[in-house]
Each structure stands twice: as structure tokens, then as C-alpha cells.
Amino acid sequence: MALDLYDATGKELLYSIDDAGLTALEPIFLTYQHWTGIPIDPYADGRLSQENAATLIRIIDQWALTERLEIDRPRTIEILSFRGILNYFILRKTDLLLRGD
């Protein structure tokens, strides 16, 4: 199982989230769905606008304030790396296409 992030045209693979990454990001994705009503499903395709990516960043920032980040370092690294990727694409004004398995 993986979730791939493509440019909005779907032609260029920009980033891929593996099983471990999806497991780490699951609480972030659930909170995102709760806030927006939009699920991020690793088995389906979807779109992630720059505005929705910014929402994910806000969720991750809140998560980082409430979690003890040193307890599960691999999980923390995965989530904060994903935050960095989202920020990178926001700065480049790039909407994303999400493709699940």
C-alpha cells in the first residue's frame, strides 16, 4: 500500500508515502477528514489543493505541540518530513494529485 503525490496533471511523481508513512500519518489524515469532511484514502485517488495542504500543515503543527515527539522518533520524522514536503509544494504554488493503490 502506498500513496503517491503527483503534480496536478498526474504526469510527474513528486513524492511517495509507503506503508510506514501511512501508518504514522493516519491520525493526521483522520483529523483532516474531521476538519474538512474530505478523506485522504490510500486506496483511492484524490486532489490536494494548496489551501488543503495548508490545513494539513496546521494539523501537523497542532499535533507537534501536543505530542511527546521523542517517544516515537520514526513516526515524528515521518510526519515532520511530510509537513516539509507540503510546505515545499505550497511555496511553489503546486496543487497535488493523490493516487492510492
Image (spheres, grey):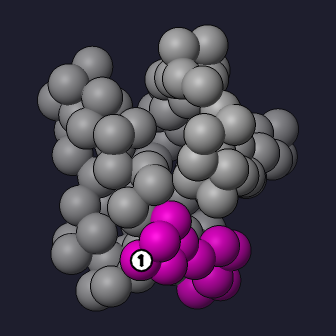
Residue segment shown in magenta: 11-21
Q: Is residue 95 shown left or right of residue 97?
A: right
Q: Position of residue 21 (x, y in %)?
A: 50, 65
Residue 11 sits above or below residue 55 on the image:
below
Label 1: element kind = helix
Closer-to-camera residue (94/88) = 88
Q: Residues within 10 Å of mark 1 (few under 14, many from 20)?
A: few
Kindly indicate the quadrant of the structure image that contains residue 60.
Answer: top right
Work out whether residue 77 can be spotted: yes
Closer-to-camera residue (66/26) = 66
> Does 14 appear in magenta?
yes
Q: How many dots with numbers?
A: 1
Kindly indicate the quadrant of the structure image that contains residue 28.
Answer: top left
Closer-to-camera residue (100/74) = 74
> Does 68 appear in magenta?
no
Residue 51 sits above or below residue 38 on the image:
above
Residue 2 sits above or below residue 58 on the image:
below
> Looking at the image, which residue is at 23% across and 61% down?
41
Q: Position of residue 88 (x, y in %)?
A: 81, 47
Q: Is residue 53 shown left or right of residue 69?
A: left
Specify the quadrant that holds the C terminus: bottom left
Q: Amino acid at mark 1?
A: Asp
Q: Is residue 35 shown left or right of residue 58?
A: left
Work out whether residue 97 can be spotted: no
> Looking at the image, which residue is at 65% across and 32% down?
69
> Looking at the image, which residue is at 33% across and 85% down?
1
Q: Position of residue 97 (x, y in %)?
A: 46, 65
Residue 37 sits above or below residue 28 on the image:
above
> Looking at the image, which residue is at 20% across and 25% down?
34
Tell me the residue that label 1 is attached to. Answer: 19
Furthest toward the front, the residue is 71
